[in-house]
Amino acid sequence: MARAGLTAARVTQAAADLADEAGFDKVTVSAVARVCGVRDASLYSHVKSLQDLRTRIALLAGEELADRVAAAVAGRSGRDALTAFADAYRDYARAHPGRYAATQIRIDPAALADSPKALRKIDTTYAMLRGYGLEEPDLTDAVRLLRSTFHGYVSLEAGGGFNHSRDVQASWERAVEALHVLLEHWPAAAAPTAADARDR
Amino acid sequence: MARAGLTAARVTQAAADLADEAGFDKVTVSAVARVCGVRDASLYSHVKSLQDLRTRIALLAGEELADRVAAAVAGRSGRDALTAFADAYRDYARAHPGRYAATQIRIDPAALADSPKALRKIDTTYAMLRGYGLEEPDLTDAVRLLRSTFHGYVSLEAGGGFNHSRDVQASWERAVEALHVLLEHWPAAAAPTAADARDR
DNA sequence: CTAGTTTGCCTAGGAACCCTAGGCAAATGA
DNA sequence: TCATTTGCCTAGGGTTCCTAGGCAAACTAG
């Protein structure tokens, strides 16, 4: 019988494409096997389990996203860098909803260690923020805020959370602008307040 | 045979509790039936399908969350209101991870219309922001930014996205503070820029 | 070229899950 | 009290995940 010539990478690619077309939750071993023209049991030579398959998609997407963002930010700084970062991030999420959804799953740290690229997205964020003159721990706080906002925005947008008539693209640009302003006027280390006292 | 006395509400409650304990993806008809001490087929008298069950959890969680947030914000304004909103939101998500995860699923608009309470969370956000003197369309932009940041933050936190040594609670408080500052210095309607020109 | 090894894909089959159909008995109301 | 409704049941079909074991294509060594 003719062989399909599958590899783990090829299977992951097919699964990622399926995720983008049909939704990440539609990625099943059977469905991917169908796409590959193969019986479901045959995929288990290349992939350990459904979870393994999903982790591979997540790592693939993480690397792709990190590459796009890094390329967009390269050679820019300040507002330019922030805008490029934000747009590259959102564009990827919109173009690859299934892959982006995959990046949200909790992945086994051991598997993550095998993919240093996916981790380096965070480094890109840190590098970009150095232009704003922030020092630790404000740097980490700002990185978390940016990641949260970007992730939250594309996540809500993908989930149809913005049904108001206001144009989403315009709204996004204002949000990025607002974040830029925020980074330039990052509140100085807070004077002790009730909130800080509660902070252990 | 003795009856278990189930109702749609009771089933939803059990399913929501299971979601919080085991994870939203572990909510299956069979598992909920086991918890209720009943055969899986029996649940279909109360619930149309697995999707229906999940939608019910999402609506329940949406209402609970809206209630908590509304109660927290009541009688406050400005920074107080923002902090109360943010903390109530995050506290709920941390206390009820499964319920919170449920709120992220895409729900049939028809089903959503039956639950006006869940929708009113947005209204609470708008009401809170009026204290900052924003007018449309900035108001909507700000609401989207806040929702995104809060959702993104608790979402990343729940997914274990913050492994840096920096204390998450302290980071969160700085983020909320930063958002407060941002709202007070919300950038004026942008002067026409290249970005705006692209905006249709 | 040939013989042994590896490997890619197969069939078979068990377990869990979703859901429908149809039955019986408990609860309800005339 | 008796008919109706309703809550839960068993039976069973379809899908999916995954394991075990087999066969033949592709590679490797003599």
Image: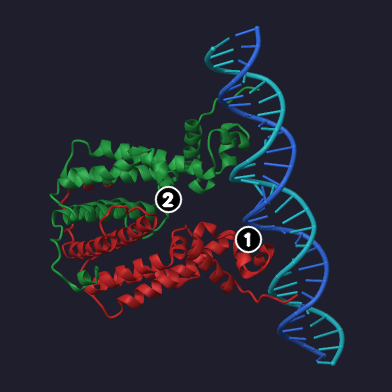
Chain colours: A red, B green, C cyan, D blue
Residue ID at (27%, 62%): A172
Return the chain for callout 1: A
Tell me if A197 is positioned left or right of B32 in this view: left
Q: Secondary structure at mark 1?
A: helix
Q: For this rendering, which residue is in front, A78 or A2?
A: A2
Q: For this rendering, which residue is in front, A128 or D30?
A: A128
Residue ID at (60%, 67%): A35
Q: Secondary structure at mark 2?
A: loop
- Please provide percent x and percent y for residue B65: 34, 40
Tell me if A39 is positioned left or right of D4 in this view: right
- Location of the N terminus of chain B (image quadrant): top right
Residue ID at (20%, 69%): B196
Q: Is residue A103 above or below residue B73?
A: below
- Please provide percent x and percent y for residue D4: 59, 20
Res B144 quadrant in image: bottom left
Return the chain for callout 2: B
Q: Is residue B140 above or below residue D28?
A: above
* Badge number at residue A30: 1
Q: Is residue B178 above or below residue B129?
A: below
Residue kind at label 2, given as amino acid type = Arg
Q: For this rendering, which residue is in front, B107 or C13?
A: B107
From mark 2 to mark 1, how far is it between C-alphas? 24 Å
Q: For label 1, count other residues whose C-alpha is less than 10 Å away and answer few (under 14), some (14-19) or many (20+).
A: some
* Badge number at residue A109: none
For residue A197, say whether it is visible: no
Res A166 quadrant in image: bottom left
* Badge number at residue B106: 2
For residue B152, say whether it is visible: yes
Residue kind at label 1, given as amino acid type = Ser
Q: For this rendering, which residue is in front, A10 or C7?
A: A10
- Please provide percent x and percent y for residue B168: 32, 53
Q: Is residue B120 above or below residue D16?
A: above
